Image: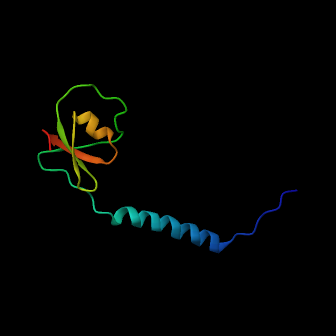
Amino acid sequence: MLRRLPFQPSLALGLMLLASGTAAQQSDRPSPTVPPTGTACSEPRPQICPQIYQPVCGYKANDARHTYSNACTACADKQVVGHRPGPC
């Protein structure tokens, strides 16, 4: 014979608060900006990139910049939100 466990409102309330807190943390973050002449990286991120040298300046989420060998390599870095042509 199976026994049913009593419903615990405090557990349900705790789970709802946890879920709402996670969503609030994500929306409170400032969204990084891609330069007007740049291209935003999209999901899914590339796993394999060609070995072509066409340098781009990658813009990271923390406003840092880094020169990558090409656009694919820049977007393969999960911290990069976008890139523009040419080195940084």
> Which residue sits at x=28%, y=40%?
75
Tell me what residue is drawn at x 32 percent, y 42 percent.
Answer: 77
Classify 66 as above or below 52: below
In the image, what residue occupies the spot 42% across and 63% down?
23
**The image quarter in which residue 48 lies:** top left
> In the picture, which quadrant includes the N terminus?
bottom right
Q: Quadrant of residue 39?
A: top left
Q: Toward the viewer: 36 or 83?
A: 83
Q: In the image, 38: left or right of 76?
A: left
Q: Is residue 46 above or below residue 8?
A: above
> In x, y percent, where is residue 40?
23, 45
**Would you say 13 lies left or right of 40 here?**
right
**Residue 84: % across, % down:** 15, 42
Colour basis:
rainbow
Number of labelled discs?
A: 0
Residue 52 locus on image (x, y percent): 22, 25
Q: Among all residues in the image, which is located at the extreme top?
A: 51
- In the displayed structure, 55 sits above or below 57; it is above
Direction right: furthest residue: 1
Q: Is residue 2 left or right of residue 21?
A: right
Figure check: 4 above or below 88: below
Please identify the residue farthest to the bottom as the structure is shown.
10
| Residue plotted at (28% across, 62% down) | 30
Q: Position of residue 27 (x, y in %)?
A: 35, 63
Please state, as top left, top right, bottom left or bottom right, where the C terminus lies in the image.
top left
